[in-house]
Structures are given as C-alpha cells and as structure tokens.
Amino acid sequence: MRSKTRSLAVAALAAALTLGTALPAGAATTVLTTGHVDVLDVDYTAGALTVQLLDGTGSPSVRRAPSTVELDVLAAAKTTVPNNSAYGFLGTPGSTVWILPQTQNANLLWPGWNSTDVPAGTFQGNTLTMSLLGVSGGNLSVYTQSLGTPTVLYNSGDGLPDAKPLTTGGHTHANWAFSAAGTYTVTFRVSGTLAATGATVSADATYTFKVLP
C-alpha cells in the first residue's frame, strides 16, 4: 500500500504539472541512454491525475519528474526510411530517421507508457485520452508495427494535436521515430472523465529527447 507521504507528494506534483509550474530550479538532470523507460507513467491517486516518467533502466524502477530527465536517442538508432508507401509518414524513402524500436534493443532506450496504477472504475469506461500536443526540434512519429505493417498513433508531421484512447491498467511499447538529429521538446496531455462525478481532469507533461547524429 502506498504511503500517505507519497500520495501527498504525487498530489503536489500533479498540481505543479496542471498549473504549468516549474519544478525547483537547479534540479539535477538524469540522462537516460539505454534500457526500459515508460515515458508516460500515468496514475490517479489522492484525487489527482498525474503523468510522470518511470525509469526502469535500473533496479528498482524510479519515478521521475519529466522535466528532470533527458532521453537520449543514440546513433545506433539511425536507419533509413523503407521504400514502402506504408512508411511514408517517416519521410522520403532512403532518407535518415532515428527509431527507438517497439521491441527491446539492449543498446537503445525502450520507451513506452503505462496506466497500470490507475484504479479500475475511476474513469468512465476505464478509458483515458492520451494526446500529443506539441513537438519542437523535428518531426516525431509514434507507431506500432505488426507483420511489417505500421499503425501510426501520433505524427507531428501532419499536424497536432493527435489523440488516442488509453485503457486504464495497460502497458504499451511502440516505435518512436525522429526525423533529424537535435534536441526535441515533446508535450503530452492525459485526460479523462471521472466515473463518480462526471468531471474532466487532465495532466500535461513535457519531455526532452536528444537525438545524436
């Protein structure tokens, strides 16, 4: 069972994210380069919806404020866009793209998202909405792939916001594709309608990705 202290801390973080309040100046930046990370770690506790980052690159896993983390996309992620029209959202065939893959590669970050700690019955239909609000630094595409066929979930290259349903209690991994080297600022929003009151609640989180040439 989670402690009262942790619940209060999470509620305070939720308030800061909702109001757009910056975390304390001078907070150390954690740079992540390889291993499992849930970029969006969605929770509802102490009456607040929160979006944090679950760092699973070590043991035990650690929840971190997104603003204190840099997610590095190493040069090993660099590949070329397939000569297949289904992948046209990535760019021109043969052009360079950096992809953090849906399937774990020990030499790269393995990014995903989860809502495993959201209690069942909290939100109508046990469903939230996960929206990509903004991307700077290049184009970002997030997509799943099955039997060689991609399903695009988010694509900043054709306009934002993009929104998709997020089932509570879930855990998902996908391909994260970046169009160019450089530093990206990526903002997501998670929202939902409370089953008990019909009120809509939301939380925003902004992440920094550094794509290495």
Image (cartoon, rainbow, N blue to C red):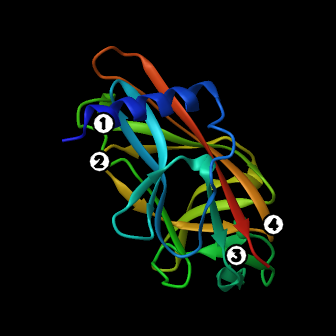
- Which image quadrant for residue 48? top left
Distance from disc 3 to disc 2, alpha carbons, whole Å, reads 30 Å
Q: Compare marks 1 and 2 and give the one earlier in the sequence.
A: 1
Residue 19 in sight: yes
Callout 2, which amino acid? Gly
Q: Which residue is drawn at the image coordinates 47% and 64% (left, top)?
A: 37
In-image side of 158 versus 133 (left or right): right
Q: Compare marks 4 and 3 and give the one earlier in the sequence.
A: 3
Distance from disc 3 to disc 1, alpha carbons, whole Å, reads 34 Å
Distance from disc 1 to disc 4, alpha carbons, whole Å, reads 37 Å
Label 4: which secondary element? strand
The residue indicated by pointer 2 is 169
The residue indicated by pointer 4 is 182
- Which image quadrant for residue 155? bottom right
Q: Compare marks 3 and 1 and give the one earlier in the sequence.
A: 3
- Circles 1 and 4, Cβ within 8 Å, touching? The answer is no
In what quadrant of the picture does the N terminus appear? top left
Q: Compare marks 3 and 2 and give the one earlier in the sequence.
A: 3
Callout 1, which amino acid? Asn
Q: Which residue is drawn at the image coordinates 33% and 64% (left, top)?
A: 60
- Asked whether 210 or 9 is in front, the reply is 9
Label 3: which secondary element? strand
Distance from disc 4 to disc 3, alpha carbons, whole Å, reads 11 Å
Label 1: which secondary element? helix
Residue 82 in sight: no
Q: Nearer the viewer, mark 4 or mark 3?
A: 4
- Res. 98 mark: 3
Callout 4, which amino acid? Gly
In what quadrant of the picture does the C terminus appear? bottom right
Distance from disc 2 to disc 4, alpha carbons, whole Å, reads 34 Å
The residue indicated by pointer 1 is 126
